[in-house]
Structures are given as C-alpha cells and as structure tokens.
Amino acid sequence: MTQNIYDNEAFFAGYSRLPRSIEGLEGMPEWPALRALLPAMAQLRVVDLGCGFGWFCRWAAAEGAARILGLDVSERMLARARVETAPGAVTYRRADLEQLDLPAASFDLAYSALALHYIEDLEGLLAAVHRALVPGGRLVFSVEHPIYTAPRRPGWVESAGGGPGDGKVWPVDAYLDEGPRRTDWLAKGVIKQHRTIATYLNLLIRLGFALTHLEEWGPTAAQIALHPHFAVERERPPFLLVAAVR
Amino acid sequence: MTQNIYDNEAFFAGYSRLPRSIEGLEGMPEWPALRALLPAMAQLRVVDLGCGFGWFCRWAAAEGAARILGLDVSERMLARARVETAPGAVTYRRADLEQLDLPAASFDLAYSALALHYIEDLEGLLAAVHRALVPGGRLVFSVEHPIYTAPRRPGWVESAGGGPGDGKVWPVDAYLDEGPRRTDWLAKGVIKQHRTIATYLNLLIRLGFALTHLEEWGPTAAQIALHPHFAVERERPPFLLVAAVR
C-alpha cells in the first residue's frame, strides 16, 4: 500500500491550507505550463492519478471531457472531492496507485500532478498506464524535480562568498543515489522517492512511450512580479513536467 | 566563430596533460557508458563533431566504420590527430561547428563528446546534423551536465551540518538562467553555454529526433574502487549523455 500520508491528521490539515488546496488550479503556479502540455479535452476519456480534491477532474469536465476517473489513496480527499463535484462526467474511486488496475486501451489521457514521486513501483504504475491508454493516447505528469528531491539535507543555504551576485544556493548531493527520502513537510517522516530525470525518461521510453516535451518548471517574470518570494525558485526548478505519447 | 580555446597555448598544454588526452578513450571514465549507446560501427558513415586528437575516429575505423569525418575548430588538435592516424577511413577537417555545413542524408551516425556545451547556436548545429543524417540515423553525444554548468560559483563546498552523512555538496543556483558561464578551467575565461536538460531534449524533439536514451553519468562502484577520488562525482553527475534517432 502506498504511504497514505494524506490521511494523517496533521498532514491533511496542513495540506488543506496550501494555496493549491484553497484556490485549486489557480493556486498552482505550474498549472499554466502543465495545461499547455494537455491536448484539447473535448470528448476525451481521462484518468487522474492522485486526484486529491478533484480540481483537475472538475476542470476537465468543464472543458468537455467525456468521462473522467479520479483516483486517490486518501479517503479524506475523495470525500471532499465528491462533495464539491456536481453530478456528471467525473467518477472518484479509492485506489492504491502501487496496484493500479485499469481496463486496457480505455483512456485518451492519463494525468498526474505531484503524485508519482510517492510511488515505489513506478515501473509497475507506468506499465499499467501504458496498457490503459489507447495508441496515440497522452501521458502528462508533474513530479518534484530530482534536483529538489536529491539532497540529504534539502533547504536553501546562503552562498558563503558574500560578493556581488551571491545569494541562496541549493546544496545538491546524493543525486545519483536513488531511493527514499524522508522529509518533514507538513508532517514528520513523509517518504518521497528520489529518481533521476534519466530514470523517469528511460522508463517511459522502455515502456513504449515517446517523449514529446520536458519542462523544468520555474516561475515566470510575471509570476515573480506578483509574488516576489517565488524568485528563488528559478535558482533550481522545484517541479519536472513531462509529456509523452503512447 | 566558435571560441577556439583549444588553440590557446596554456589551455592546449593543460588539455594535453589530461588522462583523456594521454590515454584516449580509456582515459574517459564515461566512455563505457557512451559506447553502450552507439550502434554497431561496421560499414557506418560517421561524423565526429569536435574530434580533438581523433581517438574516437580511430576507434570507429578499427571497429569497421566505412568512412569517418572528424571535425574540429582547433588546428593544433587536428595536426596531432593527423599524425597519429594511419591512412584509411578517417578524414579530418577544420570546421566551425557554429557554421556546420554537411551534405544531406550522408551519415548514419553523428557523435560528439564534450563539445556541444561550447556552442552558442546549438539549434543551428543540431538542425544541420538532422539534415546530414539518413532517416533512422543516430545522434549520440555527451555534454557537461546542466547541474554542473549552472552555478555562478561552481565547486564543491563542505556541508555545514557536520553530522553523520555530511560531506561535499554542489551549490546549485541560476539553473534556469541559461547562457554563458565563464570559468577558469585550464585557462582563464573559458566560456561555456549553460542549458537545461529540458532545452537539450526539447530542441531535439522539435527538430524531429526521437529520444532513445538519457544518461546522467556518474562513476560505477568498480571505477570508484580503482579511483577513490571519483566517488564525489556521484553526488552530482558531471556529464549528460544523450542518444536519439532521426
């Protein structure tokens, strides 16, 4: 079973207060870049892996997707998603993404936002996604960027020099040592899986996907003008966005 | 014209003393990984972009390649390459890779080792490579890894904590700010071009290449056993290896 940190009381309370939980897609600064990787949604059959509160599922329904299946391991998140979603194209289902079981060739788009870096058996999950997509079907996902997940001691440090141009640096180590990383984000002992960019991409290629776009996301100048504290995220990208076609 | 640092006296002297200049491919720890990305060489028409002293060209000839064109901007390097290469399949030619001009559909393999991060107009070069390859032709190259080239002040720093597991960290900043980086490697003011992984890959995809493999290279356990000072390179990969097909 996937670590179900979202049903941890402290984590859920903290997560629920994040801008992306209150404002939905508009509270995700990487959403415009992720949306740009998506096909036109009209008539698509869509699965959302790690749907959370259902913001993307509702957006897809509003954009005219034919059928949207939202999967998540957290009962609490699904409960809120169901309350906030009008009857129609969206179905929510509790699912352990480590044991994903979907009918073959039944989806045009698989989407996942910031969920896959919690998955231990990523190859098993992506193989199931490949089977579930029709030929020509799309996979679009975001994960925490490997530069972000690598360090043994993540966190900005002040550059020692003190000269002009000095500022915060991100202390990368252990980049090539893949595996679990324990962090205290919102709750103690959240386990994420660090993988290199090469591992993500070679896995997709080996399974028969063709890579169509990679984005190492950082805030735009317009976003930094609105939210000056975003600026530091350009020093090292927090998110990796991937688009591929079956 | 490409910055021709290799014809700088101090740089050339320093470069000539590197293990990879004395021992050739055997002095390149990333060579086994790069070789693993290459097709069988027998009968291939090969171009080497930045051939240096011609080690790869001679290897390709020994492996049975039909015709090998070695291109480099440095007259000094080509002079030594010509002296050390027996008459046969290899031709060396001085060329500015910023102005690459090759006949269409005339090569089965384009190879480049640690040269493309000096190129300003990488799109122009890769477009020329795409035209020069036959359909199904291969592009295999290595560059300095973007994590390696990004920092404003590259160089290992000691982790501040002092606790168990502490050691050297690589201070990443400016990762998303692409463009020139001035370093003092072998000579003062060597200019390299920092690009993100996404920029390299999206450029290839846009030009019509399909990515077949990505490697963020670090030394193997066997290499570290032989050369213990290599170990630190696993903290952040020094090289990025890319294989693609036209």
Image (spheres, coloured by chain):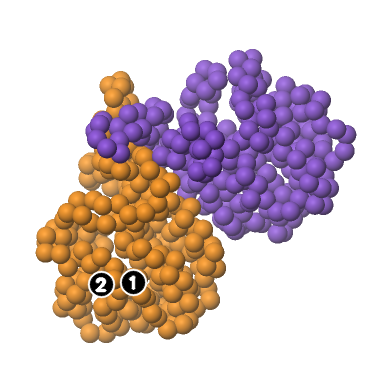
Chain colours: A purple, B orange
On the question of residue A26 being in view, the answer is yes
| Horizontal and vertical percent position of residue A104 | 76, 50
Front position in the image: A10 or B163: A10
Which residue corresponds to the image point at 36% horizontal and 75% vertical from the top-left?
A: B99
Residue type (three-letter) at the residue carrying disc 1: Leu
Drawn side of residue A64 relative to residue B13, left or right: right
* Left or right placement of residue B70 versus residue A106 in this view: left
In the rendered image, residue B56, in percent from the top left (x then y), is placed at 29, 69
- In the picture, which quadrant includes the N terminus of chain A? top right
Q: Residue at x 26, y 62 (%)?
A: B25
Q: Secondary structure at mark 2?
A: loop
Mark 1 or mark 2: whose residue is earlier in sequence: 2
Q: Is residue A200 above or below residue B242?
A: above
Q: Residue at x 54, y 39 (%)?
A: A223
Task: From this view, report whether residue A46 is shown above or below residue B179.
Answer: above
Q: Amino acid at mark 2?
A: Val
Q: CA distance from mark 1 to mark 2?
A: 7 Å
Q: What quarter of the picture does the C terminus of chain A occupy?
A: bottom right
The residue wearing badge 1 is B97
Residue linked to disc 2: B73
